[in-house]
Image (cartoon, helix red, strand yellow):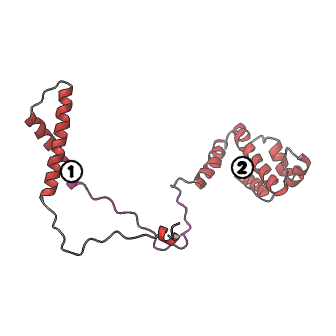
Amino acid sequence: MSSTSIDDLLAFEEEAAAPAGPQARPSRWRPVLRSLAWAAAVVAVLLVGLRAVGLQVSLPVLIAGVLAVLAVRRVTALLAPPPPPPPPRPAGAGEEDGSYNWGARDALRGAINQWERPLDWSSNRTERFTEVVLPRIGELADERMRLKHGVTRESDPARARVLLGDRLWTFLETPPRRTPSPRDLAVIVAELESI
C-alpha cells in the first residue's frame, strides 16, 4: 500500500526550471535547416507520387516549386496580424450588473421563444391560439395543481374547477371566439400563479 496522500495527488508542481548555467544562444541556421528538411521531404513525396502515376517532372523545377510554396507560406505567417487579445475578465467576481444579454443563446431565451412565437403567430388567428397556446396554458394549470394539490383537470374535475375558479375554468374548457388581448392574458397568468 502506498503512503501517498490526496494532497500529493492533487498538488500542482511547476515544471523543473532550466539549469542556472549560461543559456545557449539560439542558432540562426536552425529554422533554415528545418525548412530545407521539410522541402526535401515534400519533394521526395511528390517525386514518388508523380512517378507512381506516370508523370515525369524535372527535379530542379519540382524543388524550385516546393521552395517557392514554403517561402510564400513563411512570409504570410510572418505578415499575419497577431491574434486578438483575450476578452477582458470582469474586474470583480461579485454581483452582476443585472442586465440580460439578449444576443446570447441560452435556456432562458429558448423558453421565452417557446411562448413568444406562438403568441405572436396567434395574435390575429383565433384557431391558432386554440390549437397551440390554449393547450399549453392548460398543461401549466394541470402541472401547478398537480404539484400543489395533487389533482389535475382530468383526475378530479370538480376539485380542479374549485381550485381554478370559474373564469380560468371557462377559459380553459371553452375555446375563445377571439384571441385574448395581452391584458386578458396577464389576468389569466396571474390567476394561474395564484393556484
Front in this rendered view, residue 189 or 151: 151
Front in this rendered view, residue 76 or 189: 76
Residue depth check, mark 2 versus mark 1: number of the one nearer the observer: 1
Residue 74 at x, y = what percent? 19, 50
Residue 134 at x, y = what percent? 74, 44
Asked if residue 167 shows in the view, the reply is: yes
Front in this rendered view, residue 3 or 132: 3
Describe the element under mark 2 as helix, strand or loop. Answer: loop
Label 2 sits on residue:
181
Q: How many marks?
A: 2
Asked if residue 71 shows in the view, the reply is: no
Describe the element under mark 1 as helix, strand or loop. Answer: helix
Kind of residue indicated by mark 2:
Ser
Q: Around disc 1, counting alpha carbons within 10 Å, would you say few (fewer than 14), some (14 to 19), or many (20 or more)?
A: few
Give the position of the C terminus as an image quadrant: bottom right
Tell which residue pokes out farthest to the top in this image.
54
Q: Around disc 2, counting alpha carbons within 10 Å, would you say few (fewer than 14), some (14 to 19), or many (20 or more)?
A: few
- State whether the magenta stretch is mostly helix, strand or loop: loop
142 on left or right of 35:
right
Image vertical order of residue 172 relative to residue 147, above or below: above
Image vertical order of residue 115 relative to residue 20, above or below: above
Residue 64 at x, y = what percent? 10, 40
| Residue 116 part of the magenta-drawn span | no
Give the mark, 2 or 1, whose residue is nearer the N terminus: 1
The residue lying at 82 percent from left, 53 percent from top is 145
Tell which residue pokes out farthest to the bottom in this image.
20
What's the magenta region? Answer: 78-102
The residue lying at 83 percent from left, 43 percent from top is 173
Real-space Cα distance between discs 2 and 1?
Answer: 62 Å
Residue 25 at x, y = what percent? 15, 67
Label 1 sits on residue:
76
Kind of residue indicated by mark 1:
Thr
